[in-house]
Amino acid sequence: MGKSVHYYLSVWYYAVIGLIECVIIVFILSEWKLPSCGQDRWILMLIAVLGITGQTFLIKALQIEKAGPVALTRTVDVVLAFFFQFIFFNRAPTWWSLGGALCVVLSTSGVALRKWYNSSRRS
């Protein structure tokens, strides 16, 4: 999108498409229920707010920086997911999930570092 398009436009489409997908899936599964507990409703709202905040930061980062360093930074999500899973849910990741995460981190890091190296060598 570049710097000429306001970042809220991408965030708006992220939210609208997510809402449409959720409505379609809930309609197919026939699960039109809100959580009965008050805490679960607050957690759902927190997930929505944090998702839109994360998308906003990602779009701003892509407008400010090249895609290589941003993609490299995004691989931290995988590491944090395993960390939070272990700390909060007391569940150790399996060897298969660690292997898959390692493939994702290494491939993304390799592509990002190669692009970053090539672009810095040209300039």
Image (cartoon, rainbow, N blue to C red):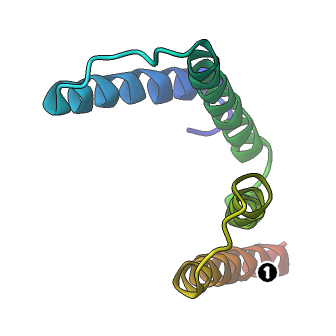
Residue drawn 48% across the image and 30% down it: 14
Residue 108 can be seen, yes or no: yes
Instruction: Provide residue 21's location: percent of width, then percent of height.
Output: 30, 31
Q: Is residue 53 left or right of residue 117?
A: left
Residue 65, how many percent across, how many down?
A: 79, 51
Query: Quick one: 92 or 74, which is closer to the camera?
Result: 92
Residue occupying image coordinates x 76% and y 44%: 61
State how many labels appear.
Answer: 1
Quadrant location of the C terminus in the rendered image: bottom right
**Res 111 → quadrant:** bottom right
Left or right: 109 as drawn, with respect to 96: right
Q: Which quadrant holds residue 85?
A: bottom right
Q: Where is residue 28 in the image (x, y as percent from the top left)?
A: 14, 31
Residue 115 position by quadrant: bottom right
Q: In this view, does 50 lie above or below 112?
A: above
Whether residue 6 appears in this view of the structure is no
Q: In this view, does 47 lie above or below 100?
A: above
Between 91 and 13, the one lying in front of the other is 91
At horizontal 58% and vertical 80% (from top left) the residue drawn is: 94
Q: In this view, does 119 lie above or below 27?
A: below
- Picture coordinates of residue 101, whole percent (x, y): 61, 77
Q: In this view, does 120 lie to the left or right of 50?
A: right
Q: Mark 1 points at which residue?
A: 117
Q: Above or below — where is 56 with respect to 40?
A: below
Determine the secondary structure under disc 1.
helix
Say which of 39 and 52 sits in front: 39
Assign the N terminus to one quadrant of the image. top right
Residue under the image location 63 percent in, 25 percent down: 43
- Which amino acid is tagged 1? Tyr
